[in-house]
Amino acid sequence: QKVRESVRTALIGWAQSKGEGSDYTDNLPGQCLHPVGHWYEVPNLLKNGLLQKLLTERPALKYLMIHNIDTLGADVDPTVLGLFASRTDGVMVEVIPRRLEDRGGGLARVDGRLRLVEGLAMPREEAEFGLTYYNSATTWVRIDALLTLFGLTRETLSDTEKVQEGVRRVAARMPTYVTLKDVKKRWGAGQEDIFPVAQFEKLWGDITALPDWQASFVAVPRLRGQQLKDPAQLDGWLRDGSAAHIETLCEWG
């Protein structure tokens, strides 16, 4: 008990000395960088000019497929693309059958509306295990509908001020999650301290909850939507055929 109290006292003293509620910058940038949530990745396409560049080079472009880098089985499947093109939804999210080890939210019906619910938004941790489908985080996006949501058009993408205003307006409608993360203060010679910090995140799946935004969902095979987040999963992937499936998707150098 004395050790626990000593640790708590040390952490409280550290927080007070650095300024409670201030940004954590007491380290090398690469050691205190944490993502602010993947919701920002799509608005970043608007702000950094990449989407405008794509539309300039390919004016006929209508759809985007967005997926996590660790969703190794994701590809531009013509069947799924054809299904999305036949609909009018702003986004279509791929979901997969859920397993016990899947953490991060899934498909649920909230107040009669089908939407993605993040694990961080669950009232109880065990409630997440009651969801049948897991969010693969692979999303098909209708570009013109996305621009309308942000109050933009293809022509106004070059208006930096209008783009920033649109991003801020939609961001204000998205929930913000507060999570605790550990950062390491490395002193050298193998010595380091670990401190807890609060991280603020916005997550892309919450866009499916906006009342003025159409979202649909499609169940796809688990091999297409599962994510490889830890090397410890590799043995399981070899046993259940996941690795063999990835081998068939492309030619490896």
Image (cartoon, helix red, strand yellow):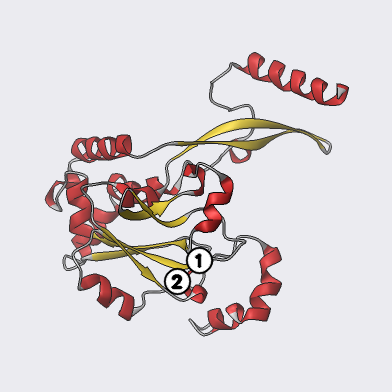
The answer to whether residue 182 is above or below residue 4 is below
Taking 203 as reference, is 146 left or right? left
- Dot 1 lies on which element? loop
- Dot 2 lies on which element? loop
Q: Quadrant of residue 150?
A: top left
Q: Quadrant of residue 144?
A: bottom left
Q: Which residue is mark 2?
A: 74
Q: Amino acid at mark 2?
A: Ala
Q: Judge whether residue 153 can be spotted in this image.
A: yes
Q: Position of residue 181 (x, y in %)?
A: 62, 37
Instruction: Give the alpha-carbon distance from disc 2 to disc 1, as whole Å.
Output: 6 Å
Q: Which mark is residue 42?
A: none
Check if mark 2's residue and mark 1's residue have beta carbons within 8 Å. yes
164 or 131: nearer the viewer? 131
205 or 25: nearer the viewer? 205
Task: Using a 10 Å C-alpha cutoff, classify the residue at mark 2 as few (fewer than 14 neighbours), some (14 to 19) or many (20 or more).
Answer: many
Q: Position of residue 202 (x, y in %)?
A: 42, 42
Q: Which residue is mark 1?
A: 71
Q: Judge whether residue 252 can be spotted in this image.
A: no
The answer to whether residue 26 is above or below residue 177 is above
The C terminus sits in image quarter: bottom right
Q: Amino acid at mark 1?
A: Thr
